Image: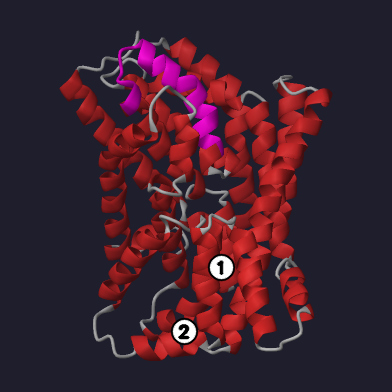
Amino acid sequence: MLTVILFALLILFLVLTVPLAISVAFASTIALLAFNIDGFVAIQRIVTGLDTYSLMAIPLFMIAGKIMEKGGISQRLVDLATSLVGSITGGYAIIAVLASMFFSAISGSAPATVVAIGAIMVPAMVRAGYDKRFSIALIAASGTTGVIIPPSIPFITYGVTAGVSIGELFIAGVLPGLLMGISLIIYSYVISKIKGYRGGERSSLSSFFTNLRRSLWGLLMPLIILGGIYGGLFTPTESGAVACVYGLIIAMFVYKSLKLSDLKQTFNEAGLLSAMVLFIISTANLMNWIMTTEQVPERVSTMAGGFTGSSVMFLLVVAMMFLLLGTFLELNASIILLVPILLPILDQYDVNLLHFGVIMVVNLSIGLLTPPLGVNLFVAKSLGDVSFNQIVVSVMPFLTVLLMNLVLLILLPRISTILIG
């Protein structure tokens, strides 16, 4: 009965457009008080929800991403991608995807990737004759790689919630992220061929090496992070601190594009983003405690025991559920609310938790492109004078490409786990 009241209140608050974290906190607290449970429990569970060392990685990577974003790395990455593929058919579209993949490996944030790369590429693509709606939709879709290619905030959230190695999750996300990016490049090339979107002038070899040199320090960041974690030099949380220090040194003393006066705004923006994510995580912990106390995971597991399909069929059904939830639930909140419920069932079907983590994050990242929540859609809308409905229609083909990637990842688990051994 407690769980019924909890979910009824949560749905009511969400319908009233109350922010998700506040909806979860209010619904959980009211449900507890309705059953004469001390309200202090709510405060205790919200606080303990953040009492995990690994969660420190979230604000650290947020700061590192903001530092590199403000440090002018996005323009350098675009220049490098231009010197690589700028002259071929659909060159600007391919540049947009490549630059997004490069930047996502530094920022770990999908909306940040859309803003940083989109602000440069959308005007350039429109000037080159590309359709504005196609350009904006491509940037929004490319931004989804920001939560797959490491470092990734959702992978940190999943790792903490499921008790899985964050370092191994980072490694597991490399190939799926590259697969998504390559798929978008192939689709962009085909569309460009059909619509006659040409590339720019051919770059010289010296131009390529110049742009590589200018962007090399930024590109080294993900290699340092993954190499340090995989080599046992530091933990994922410590790698966030390393990324912050490295980013500051590069942005302030190598690129010299970040001034001391810019740090206040940079830290403020990173702090706000971190607070939003951590607030959701802390309130979701309270809701998880209620569901665990009410034995919701065990009941769901028992019900799933009657499902006689294979693990692949089970994952396809779960994928459809994630796609639905992704239309109105924030990515990190979905992970924290659903993983504790699904863990006993995953054990029944002998599903690899690393593989499932990749599937879940890829699945929910597609929710960044689906209305009504679709964060990437709203961010991309600010890049040009295009209506929200036009962006939704234009992003559908890209959504189909990403869904094909999702099915492939479900059918071929080794794509996620082959680099781990």
Residue 336 is labelled as 1
Q: Secondary structure at mark 2?
A: helix
* Residue for point 70% across, 70% down: 49
Q: Quadrant of residue 336?
A: bottom right
- Nearest to the eye among marks 2 and 1: give it: 1
Q: Within 10 Å of the Cα at label 1, are there few (<14), some (14-19), or many (20+) other Cα atoms?
A: many
| Relative to 221, 358 lies left or right | left
> Is residue 262 in sight in this rendering?
yes
* Residue for point 47% across, 38% down: 378
| Relative to 66, 89 lies left or right | left
**82 in relation to 136, above or below:** above
Q: Quadrant of residue 22?
A: bottom right
**380 in relation to 318, above or below:** above
Q: Quadrant of residue 306?
A: bottom left
* Residue for point 55% across, 29% down: 116
**Start and end of the magenta stretch?**
112-133
Determine if the magenta segment contains residue 359: no
**227 in relation to 292, above or below:** above
